[in-house]
Image: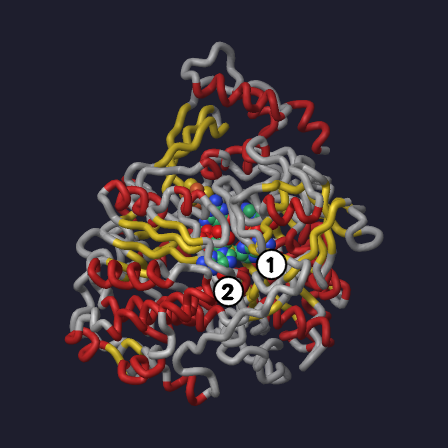
Amino acid sequence: MSARINNLITRRKFLQISGALAAATAVTNPCRVLYALTRDKGEITPNEIREVFSACDMCFNKCGLIAHVENDVIKKLDPNPKSLKSRGMLCARGNAGVKQLYDPDRLKYPLLRKGARGDGKWQRLSWDQALDHAAEKLDKIGKDYTRCGFLFMAGTDMQSTFVHQFAEAYGSYNVISHESNCLLSRNRAFLDTYGVMPTPDVLNCKYVIMPGANRFEALVTPDSMDLMTAKGNKSKLVVLDPRFTKTAALSDEWYPIKPGTDMAFFLSLAHVIISEKLYDKTFIKEKTFGFEELREHVKKYTPQWAAKETDIPAKDIARIARELAAAAPSAMVYPGRRSSDYEDSTQIRRSYAIVNALLGNWDQEGGLQVPKKIKPGSMHIEAPFYEDNPDDRVDAGRAQMMFDEEGSFKHTRDAVIEGKPYPVKGWMTYKTNPMQTGANRDKTIQMINTLDFMMTVDIAMSDTAWMADLVLPAPSYLERQDPLSAFLASSTCSGVITRDPVVPAMFESKPVFWIVKELAKRLDLGEFFDFTVDDFRKAQLKKIPQVAKALKEDGVYNITGPSFGIHKDKPFKTRSKKIEFYNTRYKDKGIDPMPVYKQPKAIPENHFRIVVGRNAYITQSASTNNTLLWELQKENHLWIHPKSALSLGIKNHDMVKVESSAGKVRIKARVTEETRPDTVYMDTGYGVLSKGLTNIFGKGACIAQILEDKADKISGNMAMHETFVTVSKT
Ligand SMILES: Nc1nc2c(c(=O)[nH]1)N[C@H]1C(S)=C(S)[C@@H](COP(=O)(O)OP(=O)(O)OC[C@H]3O[C@@H](n4cnc5c(=O)[nH]c(N)nc54)[C@H](O)[C@@H]3O)O[C@H]1N2
Ligand SMILES: Nc1nc2c(c(=O)[nH]1)N[C@H]1C(S)=C(S)[C@@H](COP(=O)(O)OP(=O)(O)OC[C@H]3O[C@@H](n4cnc5c(=O)[nH]c(N)nc54)[C@H](O)[C@@H]3O)O[C@H]1N2
Ligand code: SF4
Ligand SMILES: [Mo]
């Protein structure tokens, strides 16, 4: 079927068309080609032009956009200048969103697996057949294994709430998300220090240390743009990264830190700040808990000691500590975002949080802030109680302090494979692709092979969909109505955004709200979905009419007013009601109450550490097949330092084998000084199994295939930088 569509619109032709459209008054009506793709029928009324507000969904940032629509065909996506969070920006991926919609590889109708898993043999079903089949499986698994025998996993999305609501009504508390592959250890660390996850006011910050984050490539709005503006305003940026990222390239100082040793660096900063009394005494006295314990604790962590651990010179560590303290409180250790790195990641991030607390930057301009947030109303359901359900989540007890509502992908997968403490036999995934983003792909396949039934709701035949029994096509963000999303961002740009369909949904795609509502009807749970998305949104907007007005007029609601100095005398939501250098809850649970540095495991001889990261035109695994973005990078490469390459006889673009205990892949080498000699790297989102991703099938290698699945001990977050690999020429 994609061949047919490809005949209608080849990639090159699409680019020509986009170019022609961009060049203002097009000669003929090139939209017809797109129209043919979208509508599959004859003539159209010319020149019906609309501009429609929406929110980008090419990554989680939800940048405000304005879609230019001609004759029901989206011609171009532009930034919405009213969206303060996105600072009037739409990145490369945001611009390419139009190709997410008009992608010949889109899923078009429900598909049922025929033949062996992963063989790619499918039978087309009608929606009624597909929903009846799914409902039958949900019913049977619920009866045979209890309701908790069905696992639900939804990625970042405004409609994920409906999947959670469905799981609740159905009766399973085995609900996970991408978050335990992303940032839960960071959240754990800051919550357990501040009682809240603050946002960094990068814009007004005079001194930013950025460890293990790559803001000029891994875009987080508004931080990415604000960091650039702040640099223009003479703010200082110090980057710690084993790779020479674009952020490193634009920094004032870059240190290729030895991976896994960041805690040594930050404990040493704490040592200097405390021993040289560079902290704000009043702040420490009034707002923090456990300072004396911290003072004792960091005595041994001198810069000379840290230099040996981190490969960063002692004099630089001491100088950075002094400069940072001198710039305080408009100075920060950037909390970062993805923290799925090490088995000790919560404690590593605790060390960032602790240095921030020493700087007294809490609730300060240019510091860590918790801006005001709008609380939309909700439509809460009274979930039924199922007596035969087990006592707890299937992954319970596998990490020391897991978030109950998030769980852990790694631990859930282990539990499903082991069948312990009870069997889980069904899995629904929505808008997430754990086959590519959950470390150790073979284990994900093993998990899937233990299931009786798996269904996936996606817009494309992702590797996860490829492995499913039932694949259901969803509309893209430009075709669906979503609930409101209230977001926190720094520097007075928190707000609310929503989406309405810019164009009608293509093919037979159906939003997940409709899917779970239809399933609920079939399972006698219809009462829990006795509403529309419109009703849901009305309930959200009930007490905030000003938001409704702004969304209509501007496409976004911005919260203005100061985002600092607003929590002055409020207690912190921690046990001590203060910022906790020393965490007594940790102590009670047998966890180090203050971060204790442990050396990362030594890299075995002839091995490298492999690390994860991103570039500016790839969103995890989800955008590598997008035709416009694929043009920018058609495959991934293994970054390897020239010295290491030389010792292995590897030249640039040689094909190499990369092997770990989890698996092996073949990939072309990129010999570059942009990584440490002991560290290798590759982009995510290639080496796919799915033949439904026609641009990237057969291109590059899948990093999830070689990443071992270690977990952060405290939060259960995936730890993806604990893998050692060998590299050899093939
Ligand atoms: N273009 C683009 N933007 C994105 C995304 C995307 O996929 N593409 N994804 C979004 C999402 S979901 C997230 S969570 C964020 C992620 O944004 P970030 O949190 O900035 O995460 P990464 O890009 O993974 O950057 C981690 C960096 O840490 C480095 N590193 C590895 N080991 C160590 C170490 O031991 N110490 C130190 N100091 N550094 C180390 C890696 O080389 C890498 O450059 O980006 C968001 N924005
Ligand atoms: N190897 C590796 N693993 C990682 C990361 C990494 O960089 N490398 N990053 C980690 C991080 S920070 C995160 S946040 C997670 C993210 O992990 P995932 O949640 O798996 O995110 P994506 O890779 O973006 O996959 C999103 C899926 O949603 C589909 N999709 C896109 N738009 C829509 C839509 O509108 N509707 C529906 N139904 N589906 C849609 C895409 O086709 C894709 O299959 O991965 C983590 N794991
Ligand atoms: S950062 Fe880029 S991809 Fe992400 S929401 Fe904004 S414009 Fe879209
Ligand atoms: Mo993430």
Q: Within 10 Å of the Cα at label 1, are there few (<14), some (14-19), or many (20+) other Cα atoms? A: many
Q: Residue furthest bottom?
A: 588
Which residue matches tag 2? 260
Q: Amino acid at mark 2?
A: Gly
Which residue matches tag 1? 609
| Proximity of marks 2 and 1: CB atoms separated by less than 8 Å | yes
Front residue of 647/676: it is 647
Q: Residue furthest top?
A: 27
Residue drawn at x 41%, y 16% as measured from the top left: 24
Report how far apart the C-alphas of labels 2 and 1 lie in the structure. Answer: 10 Å
Residue 573 is situated, as x and y percent measured from the top left of the image, at 30, 77
Residue 80 is situated, as x and y percent measured from the top left of the image, at 33, 37
Ligand 1 under 8 Å from disc 1 Cβ:
yes
Residue 228 shows in the view: yes
Residue 57 shows in the view: no
Q: Is residue 716 above or below residue 329?
A: below
Rendering quarter of residue 89:
top left
Q: Quadrant of the C terminus?
A: top right
Residue 33 is situated, as x and y percent measured from the top left of the image, at 58, 21
Sequence-earlier tag: 2 or 1: 2
Ligand 1 under 8 Å from disc 2 Cβ:
yes
Left or right of residue 193, residue 599 in this image: right
Q: Report the label total.
A: 2
